[in-house]
Amino acid sequence: QEPDNVLESGIEIIAQPPGKRTRNINLLSGGEKALSAIALLFAIFKYRPSPFCLLDEADAALDEANVERFARLLKSYSGETQFILITHNRTSMEVADRMYGVTMEEPGISQTVSLELS
């Protein structure tokens, strides 16, 4: 923390997962941290939508039930925000309008494939 320079200070996030005590986000499990960060992000988007959002494996630490909730949130906010999501999770992929894949059939040679879903 930098009390003399608020622009260089971080923020402290306190969260209370269902059925648990209020804690600093650093003391939560990986899934709880991911859910807390996702909740904060979507709360900010509810207040002030962004034209786009890039998420890199934001769903990786979530269990299946929470991945489904996350995917529904993505879909519900996609009218105002374009989401670019890097994921390996099929449930998250199911809400996509378009997917891009990167594959390496030969070492050192990457190929991309795209698929229009809507």
Image (cartoon, helix red, strand yellow):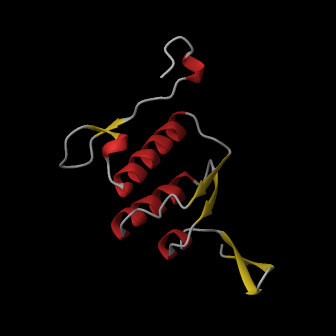
Q: How many marks?
A: 0
Lateral position of residue 65 relative to residue 117, left or right: left
Residue 4 horizontal/vertical position (percent):
53, 11
Considering depth in this image, is 100 or 73 the residue closer to the camera? 100
Residue 65: quarter of image: bottom left
Residue 30 horizontal/vertical position (percent):
38, 56
Q: Is residue 86 above or below residue 46?
A: below
| Residue at point 74%, 83% (across, down) | 104
Considering depth in this image, is 86 or 68 the residue closer to the camera? 86
| Residue at point 59%, 58% (across, down) | 56
Lateral position of residue 106 relative to residue 44, left or right: right
| Residue at point 53%, 73% (across, down) | 94
Considering depth in this image, is 111 or 90 the residue closer to the camera? 111
| Residue at point 39%, 46% (across, down) | 36
Q: Is residue 52 above or below residue 114?
A: above
Residue 84 horizontal/vertical position (percent):
65, 58
Residue 106 horizontal/vertical position (percent):
78, 88
Lateral position of residue 3 relative to residue 22, left or right: right
Which residue is outermost to the top? 4
Q: Is residue 109 above or below residue 69?
A: below
Rendered-image quadrant of the C terminus = bottom right
